Amino acid sequence: MYCQRAVRQKNMKTFLHVGCGSASKAQTTPVFRTDEWKEIRLDVDPLFKPDIVASSTNMEAIADASMDAIFSSHNIEHLYAHEVPKAIREFVRVLKDDGYLVITCPDLKAVCALVVEDKLLQPCYTAPAGPVAPFDILYGFRPHVASGRENMAHKSGFTEKVLTWTLRHYGFSKIVSMHRGSPYFDLYALATKKSMPDNELRALALQHFPRVR
């Protein structure tokens, strides 16, 4: 039994959970939730007791080419626009040559459709923390920011086109993306450090992306 466990741990891959907050491996993707993957949690806020306290713009505690994958959920929008390239370059730096990034963030195109309908403050869905309006998606969840957690404010944003361009422009080779619209208002992208055949890229993305109901 011990030998089997040792072999399994030796063969485990490692993913970096960037901007983890209170979330853990269980709140990532179906692939990362398996026993084949080891999670390393990183967050700028020590309150969440991450393995590494750091910003995604400076992950010097992590060695070059040491991660098999990165998972970043609703983290990149908390960075100022000029900080985003720094974070993307850091993602590329810490990934192994065959590594990849799974990233999700708000979809401003879908949210702004509600703003055009003058529904800026009308709840569009209910999260565990409470009702969420387009204002919260654009600028940050107001109750969190009002409680003093100013790092939860949103300082930049993306459409699907802008997200994929940003990932490619700052170092990723191949990107596949999706948007889910209402009631999710989010984007997903999977980006690889080296080139990959399109069919393999799509197959990998399908394993990580949520299914649209």
Image (cartoon, rainbow, N blue to C red):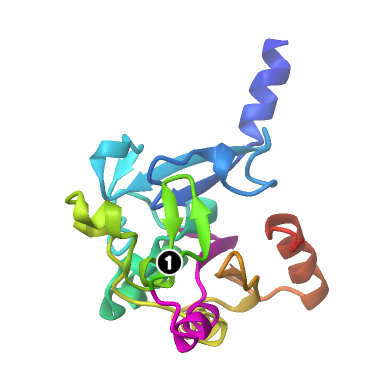
Name which residue lies at 75% across and 59% down.
Answer: 211
Q: Does residue 121 sit above or below 108 in this rendering? A: above
Q: Does residue 151 sit above or below 162 in this rendering? A: above
- Would you identify the image quadrant in which residue 38 lies? top right
Q: Residues within 10 Å of mark 1 (few under 14, many from 20)?
A: many
Q: Does the magenta stretch include residue 160?
A: no
- Residue lying farthest right? 199
Name which residue lies at 44% across and 84% down.
Answer: 118
Q: Does residue 171 sit above or below 184 in this rendering? A: below
- Would you identify the image quadrant in which residue 79 lies? bottom left
Q: Which of 152 and 102 is in front in this view?
A: 152
Residue 101 spot, x, y in % from top left: 55, 62
Q: What stretch is highlighted in magenta?
A: 94-120
Residue 153 spot, x, y in % from top left: 27, 64
Q: Can residue 71 be seen in this view?
A: no
Q: Which of 18 and 38 is in front in this view?
A: 18
Disc 1 residue type (three-letter): Ala
Q: Can residue 46 be seen in this view?
A: yes
Residue 173 spot, x, y in % from top left: 59, 78
Q: Mark 1 points at which residue?
A: 133
Residue 30 spot, x, y in % from top left: 69, 46
